[in-house]
Amino acid sequence: MDQNNQNPQGGNDPVKKLEQDLQNLTQQSATVQPPIPEEQPIQPPSPVPEVPPVVSPPPVSPVTPIEPNSPMHETPKKGSPLLVIAIVLAVFAVLAVVAYVFGTKLLSPQPTPIPKPIAAITPSPTPDVTANWKTYTNTQYNFSFKYPEYVILEDKSVPGMAQVILAAEGFSETKVTASKSDLSDFYLDASPSGKATIGGISGNKYFLPQGYCDGPTCSPPILAASIINNGTKYVVSIFVGKEASNFTDLQNQILSTFKFIEVTPVGSPTASPSSTPKATP
């Protein structure tokens, strides 16, 4: 029997037994050497393939669904009764103020507007082109008229007829006659062709396009006007062209200057003994 397996005499202590077992194991391990492993060649590490970086998508915030009963869909609450009452009172107050103002204006007496005097617009007077004309007066037949300064007047009156000739360069020859013997409506056997006015008195107008023929010769065309005033026939005749059936402005101006002197009764102390026609500058 092995000595190591024999217990000493009187050794029943378990501690002693454990110590003996440890010594035996130590001796065995010292006598047996472990085999030396062979050296293996060192292999270079295999290349690791590059992995492209992975780009992670941006985080998406979760969309929270809106619930029907969320605050955004809440039905607006109605105003409180006090607010409604305050608004109604404010409206009534405004209406009352407006009614008071209009009522005061309607009931208060309105001042009567004083009309402002309107200045009368006085038309500017038309200049009188005849103001500087010469004046011819005939006291025997009680008339007068004006004529331009450049016109030459020749008195060819005969017993029973006043006859005045007006002539000038560029002026149509005009004859003025007054007679008490012929009071007919005819002039040189021609009947009236219209109406004319002499000195504000309406009369007849005559137009003789062939003139007056006395024998083999005839005068130029004649345009004439005649009136009868206080038993006297006044005739103004003008030599005109064949187409001149109306008086010109200058001829009408001469006709408008005629004035008729009132006849003084015979035997009156104010009667004028002179009956000689005269022309005044």
Image (cartoon, helix red, strand yellow):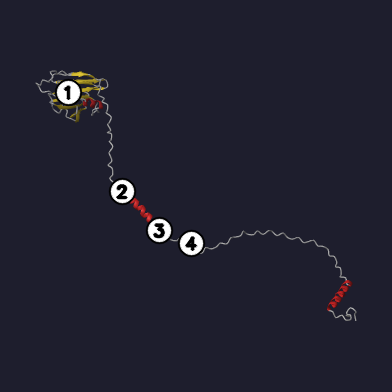
Image quadrant where residue 34 sits: bottom right
Quadrant of res 63: bottom right
Lower position in the chain sequence, tag 1 or tag 3? 3
Residue 228 in view: yes
Residues under numbered marks 1 and 2 in contact, where contact means CB atoms less than 8 Å apart: no
Q: Nearer the viewer, residue 148 or 272?
A: 272
**Which residue type carries mark 1?**
Phe
In terms of sequence position, does the residue under pointer 3 or pointer 4 come before the other? 4
Numbered badge on residue 73: 4
Asked if disc 1 and disc 3 are in contact, CB closer than 8 Å, the reply is: no
Q: Dot 4 surroundings within 10 Å: few (below 14), some, or many (20 or more)? A: few
Badge 1 density bin: few <14, some 14–19, many ≥20, Cα 10 Å: some
Mark 1 or mark 2: name the one nearer the start of the chain. Answer: 2
**Which residue is under mark 1?**
143
Asked if marks 4 and 1 touch (Cβ < 8 Å), the reply is no
Residue drawn 37% across the image and 54% down it: 91
Q: Which residue is mark 3?
A: 84
Amino acid of disc 4: His
Amino acid type, residue under disc 3 in the picture: Val
- Of tags 3 and 4, the one toward the viewer is 3
Q: Secondary structure at mark 1?
A: strand
Residue topped by disc 2: 104
Q: Residues within 10 Å of mark 3 (few under 14, many from 20)?
A: few
